[in-house]
């Protein structure tokens, strides 16, 4: 019974490493990346969304994420507003490249799709409109001071 045991004969199963990345992480990465892109802003929720429960605490408005654990990939859908006068195809490509690069870099996952939906066109404010808005704010402030 003094036979030496050869450890080379033992075969162990391959180690399986699992990592779960929550949707909120992808949303935060996308939000941070979008904040660096000029001429683009996130959409804002409305009253109907709150009634229908589409703006829950775990969901950032306008950023949907779908993970494929089997293929180690992720799909993102971004709904954004864009400033008037910007080329939509060029801006879509800029957004897609930036999001795919950042998500791949930070998570190590393959980005299989970045779907960009332009929801609204943001028109530039004219000087007259800004002055009117400032005057309205002053009037409201003066009105509220009367009742203090």
Image: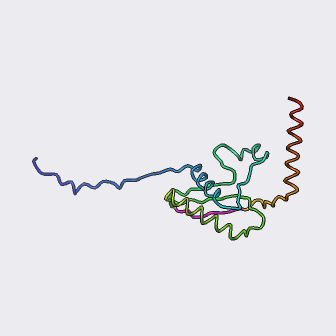
Residue shown at the point (88%, 30%) measured from the top left = 147
Q: Is residue 112 magenta?
A: yes
- Whether 51 is drawn above or below 105: the answer is above
Residue shown at the point (57%, 63%) measured from the top left = 100
Residue shown at the point (58%, 50%) measured from the top left = 23
The percent position of residue 62, horizontal first and vertical second, equals 69, 54
Q: Is residue 108 magenta?
A: no
Q: Is residue 9 left or right of residue 133?
A: left
Identify the colour scheme used.
rainbow
For this rendering, which residue is in front, 80 or 86? 86
Per the rendered image, the range of residues in magenta is: 110-117
**Picture quadrant of residue 38:** bottom right
Q: Furthest-left residue in view?
A: 2
Q: Is residue 144 left or right of residue 5?
A: right
**Picture quadrant of residue 124:** bottom right
For this rendering, which residue is in front, 67 or 106? 106
Residue shown at the point (42%, 52%) measured from the top left = 17
- Whether 96 is drawn above or below 128: the answer is below
The percent position of residue 115, horizontal first and vertical second, equals 65, 63
The percent position of residue 139, horizontal first and vertical second, equals 89, 41
Helix, strand or loop for the magenta stretch, by majority: strand
């Amino acid at each position: 019974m003094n036979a030496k045991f050869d450890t080379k004969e033992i075969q162990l199963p391959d180690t399986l490493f699992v990592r779960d990345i929550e949707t909120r992480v992808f949303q935060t990465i996308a939000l941070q990346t979008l904040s660096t892109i000029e001429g683009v802003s996130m959409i804002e929720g409305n009253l109907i969304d709150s009634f229908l429960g589409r703006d829950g605490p775990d969901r950032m408005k306008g950023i949907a994420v779908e993970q494929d654990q089997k293929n180690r990939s992720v799909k993102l859908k971004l709904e954004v507003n864009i400033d008037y006068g910007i080329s939509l195809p060029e801006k879509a490509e800029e957004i897609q490249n930036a999001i795919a690069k950042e998500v791949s870099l930070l998570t190590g996952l393959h980005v299989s799709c970045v779907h960009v939906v332009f929801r609204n066109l943001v028109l530039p404010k004219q000087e007259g409109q800004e002055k009117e808005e400032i005057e309205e704010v002053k009037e409201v402030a003066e009105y509220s001071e009367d009742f203090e």
